[in-house]
Image: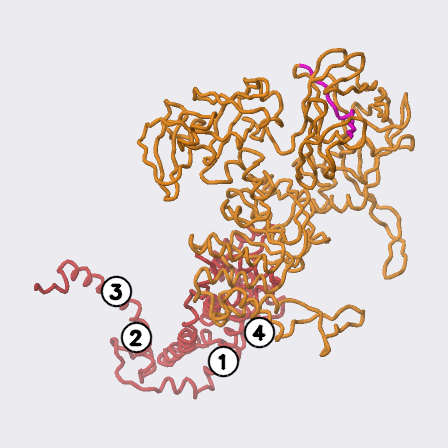
Chain colours: A orange, B red
Amino acid sequence: MANLSLKHIYKVYPNGTKAVNDFNMQIDDKEFIVFVGPSGCGKSTMLRMVAGLEEISAGELRIGDVVVNDMEPKDRDIAMVFQNYALYPHMTIYENIAFGLQMRQVPQKDENGNVILDKKGRPKMGKMPKAEIDERVKAAAEILGITDYLQKKPKEMSGGQRQRVALGRAIVREPKVMLLDEPLSNLDAKLRTQMRSEIVKLHERLQTTFIYVTHDQVEAMTMGTRIVVMKLGVIQQIDTPKNLYQMPANKFVAGFIGTPQMNFFEGTLKKIGDKVEIRLNGSQSVITIPYEIVIKAMPQYLDGNTKVCIGLRSEDVSIDPDVVKESNTTIKVKISHTEELGTETLVYGDINMDGDGFGDDSTRIVLKAAGFKNFSSGDVVDAALNMANVHLFDIKTEKSIIPRVPEYTYQDCTVQKGVLSFAGTQIKLPPAMPCPDGNYELHIPVDAISLGGNISAEVVSQEVVNKQTLARLVVGNSTLFALLDAPVEGKKVNLHIDIKKLSICKDGNVVVKPMPLINSLEGTFAMDKVKGTVEVDGKVKSRMVPKYSIVILGQKFEAPADVAVKMFSAFTGRKVFNTSFRYELSPYDFTIGEGGITASVRWMINYGDEKFIECEVAGQTFYVKADKDYSGSVTLMPDFTKVGVTEIGREIKIV
Amino acid sequence: MKKKKLFKPQKLFNIAITYLIILAVCFVFLFPILWLVLASFSKTGSIYSFKGFFPTEYSFDSFVRLFTDTQMYNYPKWFANTLFISIMSAFIGTALTILTAYCMSRFRFKSRKAMMKTTLVLGMFPSFMTMTAVYLMMTQFNLINQQWGLILIYSAGAPMGYLTQKGFFDTIPSSIDEAARIDGASNFKIFLKITLPLAAPMIVYTLLSSFVWPWSDFILPQLLLKNKDLWTVAVGLMTLPTDEFSRFAAGAVFIAVPIVIFYFALSKFLISGLSAGAVKQ
């Protein structure tokens, strides 16, 4: 019964392979989390790091409120079920389940049930009473229906029963977190389905946090409250089963979740008025869809030349004559072969009339038809595409081009005498954003918009994504997306746009850049021994104590204690002092005029309500928040409490 | 109905050849033993009175004199010495071997590979090669003429042959250890409560093999034990004169008794397969 917090967790092997790469996740109490992915994606490694069987290379893992990075598995209050059961073969089932309780140290109680304290006032620890062990073992056996087998040895039991014992051994300790490492993959198909629902029931009954690892997407979809899809150590998407299925963040997730695999085609999109024309490679058919569906896409994908990947699930393709008659998005399919599954028939074909339906190229199509269907190879049929459920991906990055949360909203705008006008709104550009008159394209990041300004807008729809609210707003005649902290009440809102985050572009060139909000500095980490005081047993003694500092631009600055701790946990020995790091500081993390780095001011960036200095130190450009105008040279004192630290060699985020 | 032939000629021939070879090998192995056993029951003691394979007269005399006539040749004393040295070496040596093998199998530490290779190479040298060095060291430690000196050498040398045991530990799935670790057992508890019970056949094998070496060794006791009272059977029997051959034979036959007893008593533990059912194979 605990929540878990996993921050920037890495597993790096000595040869530099990153088995787990920057794993970030918050797991709430009582969640059923499933890690899923193909073999070698790092899901088991991640689970073993949570269990404490594998060392965490860098990052912070909390169970409850406690950082457990360096804690022994037994102290983490977790239980684990292994793929191969890992029962103790020489013990009976009873002894197997009781072993964890016998090993445990619990506070001792006297006859009245009061905790006995030792001389120092701490609870006296000792073995758990036999009667209590007996009671708990029997209760666990009861839950799992293995009471009759308690005196048997593991080898006398079947696979399903052994897995039940393994589950019993885990639940008897009443852990905070249950970890299951592919527990069903050794069972046959029928037993697996049965145990699957039993584990789900067990989760409901125990009300504990479960983390479940599997490579089987069906298991993931049916069991998890949230699913983590991983590939090559990197998280692809964390979401509920429904969202993963309906809104995959990239092509990998789209292809991994769902059977048969999603159909992927290559093609182009062209925006014509409020419609978008889709042309698929290899097919003569042209499909027209409303612009509404791809409203979140960047404009350059809709120019009719950029190749995109178009994904459609097999159930969104129909060859039912009634559906085809009604539909105006149809395509010709040449059937190659069919697979009859009883309730439905999988029809394999090709949208290219010269194709043969084999080979994994982008014209192959699989669709589902109800009941038994007879087709002969080479038949050409009309298929209706349900374009409302279309998924679009970038060919190179494979990321969805219509993501749940778009990065920017794109608007046509004009600049006239220093006044920016878009969507019926005028903003006076500050001196920091010099822009010649003309027509431009404006990129508004979704996080640049906040409530409480003087631009009135209408709320069209809102959806909650990862505890934030994505609001679709209409300003004038244009649509804007805004990422807000809380849902908006009412239809009318007033908006404020943070103009320092805007960029103004023309023909793909950036005319006005947004304000950089991160200063990157290369540096090292150092330790000095200084005279200090230490408290030993209540007495203050003078000792030489280590003082840790961050070294940038040849100057030492004291490192905050929590930064120093994280630096040490990521390295063994003195290696940390011979490694170079990239420190990231925001323009707000500096104090001007109190010593520190000496910088020469290039110019002031004036946004009207906010001012920044662009200055130079040893060839590097710095941006610093200022409250008044400066010139000449200034001294900058960095504040490292919110610093971000990355090891340059292995690209590992440490803080 | 046609009666099936029991053996086809070809098959019969094959079987005959096989058995002939087996018999020949058995004869080669058993002939010296049989000859020794017969010699121990011979009435005439001297080696020169042997004519042919069978003795002229049979008696238990040599066995009786082995245990009664202890004035000159104290066989019971030698026997007790050998038993003491062998048992102590077997227990200490087994403990060390098992621990070494467990560490090499389960823990990953610096220079593990280097140590494994070194021990493998060192184990190839015969023990008498180091005789001079061992003798000098034992004089320094003041362990000449001490049974504990021998026990030390035998026990310390035993872990050299840990590879078989390591191979066995490697077959015990590490997920069992991990499960126990999560259950709250320390490394030593895991070893004691999980690994050792599973390794029972291996322990028995190790015990037997580390018992046999000191039991039949001649070179080291001869080198280190000067006092007649401390002699082992092997050293003692060598001092018997040629006219006491039947007594020598009786002593040699009798020394095989404990090993045979040990083997039969422990053979049921030697059956592996105790770990069946631990994990899905």
Q: Residue A509, how many percent across, how many down?
A: 68, 16
Q: Residue A605, how many percent across, how many down?
A: 83, 22
**What's the chain of the residue with tag 1?**
B
Quadrant of res A643:
top right
**What's the chain of the residue with tag 2?**
B
Residue bearing the label numbered 2: B35
**What's the chain of the residue with tag 4?**
B
The kind of residue tagged 2 is Trp
User: Badge 4 local density, few (<14 within 10 Å), some, or many (20+)?
Assistant: some
Q: Quadrant of the N terminus of chain A?
A: bottom right
| Residue B93 seen in render | no
Q: Which residues are magenta?
A: A494-506
Q: Is residue A498 magenta?
A: yes
Q: Nearer the viewer, residue B143 or A191?
A: A191
Q: Earlier in the sequence, mark 4 or mark 3?
A: 3
Q: Which mark is residue B146?
A: 4
Q: Are marks 1 and 3 in contact (CB under 8 Å)?
A: no
What separation in Å lies between label 4 and label 3 (alpha carbons)? 45 Å
